[in-house]
Image (cartoon, rainbow, N blue to C red):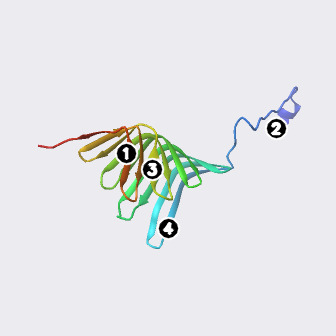
Amino acid sequence: MIFLLTKNPYELSYNSTKKELAYITLFNIKAYDIYKNGVTSLLISDKVERFSGYDKLYKINALHRGDLNLIDSVVSDKGLLAKGILYLDDNVKYTRSDDLTLNTNSVKYDMKNKILSGNRKFEFIKKNTDTKGTSFTYDMQKGIINATNIKTVIRINN
């Protein structure tokens, strides 16, 4: 620090509008939702940066145990959490313990209502059925998928 003070000319310039700095950075976090019948949700992330009004998450795995005791898992490379909504980007994969799988690049996960939705190309896979489309809404509690521009292929085993 003494070297910097004696060096001429010395200028310290910082423009706070260029990049917002996180209030806090956390590593290897686990956040639980616990109700009378135990843990119902678990959010795991390698790194979380907390900003004013939102959190940035990296390497995410969001787990949820539904009413039918099926386990839902949503994983992604990165995401943004704001007001109970988790916006996931890059390599988003949803799996359910009965072998239902969703692959897409971007998804909105309403953590309170347990609803996944996306406006990007997606693929749902369930046993011998593949469904592709351009946008979807999936109610994780009810198991209902609404999608647009879909193409479904059903493979029949002989």
**Measuring 81% from the left and 32% from the top, which residue is drawn there?**
13
- The foreground one among 27 and 69 is 69
- Determine whether 110 is above or below 37 in the image: above
Closer to the chain start, of discs 4 and 3, is 4
Mark on residue 34?
Answer: 4
- Assess whether mark 1 and mark 3 are in contact (beta carbons under 8 angstroms): yes
- Assess whether mark 3 and mark 2 are in contact (beta carbons under 8 angstroms): no
How far from the left and from the top, in percent, is residue 52? 68, 50
Mark on residue 122?
Answer: none
Amino acid carrying mark 1 in the image: Leu
**Measuring 38% from the left and 48% from the top, which residue is drawn there?**
146
For the residues marked 4 and 2, what is the alpha-carbon distance in whole angstroms?
49 Å
Is label 4 or label 1 in front?
Answer: 1
Closer to the chain start, of discs 4 and 2, is 2
Mark on residue 116?
Answer: 3
Local packing at callout 1 (Cα closer than 10 Å; few below 14, some 14-19, many 20+) is some
Closer to the chain start, of discs 2 and 3, is 2
- The foreground one among 48 and 83 is 83
How far from the left and from the top, in percent, is residue 2? 85, 36
Residue identifier under label 2: 1
Q: Please give left or right for residue 65 compared with residue 129 in the image.
A: right
Closer to the chain start, of discs 2 and 1, is 2
Local packing at callout 4 (Cα closer than 10 Å; few below 14, some 14-19, many 20+) is few
How far from the left and from the top, in percent, is residue 114? 46, 56
Q: Please give left or right for residue 138 compared with residue 56 in the image.
A: left
Is label 2 or label 3 in front?
Answer: 3
Mark on residue 102?
Answer: 1
SS label for mark 4: strand
For the residues marked 3 and 1, what is the alpha-carbon distance in whole angstroms?
10 Å
How far from the left and from the top, in percent, is residue 117? 45, 47
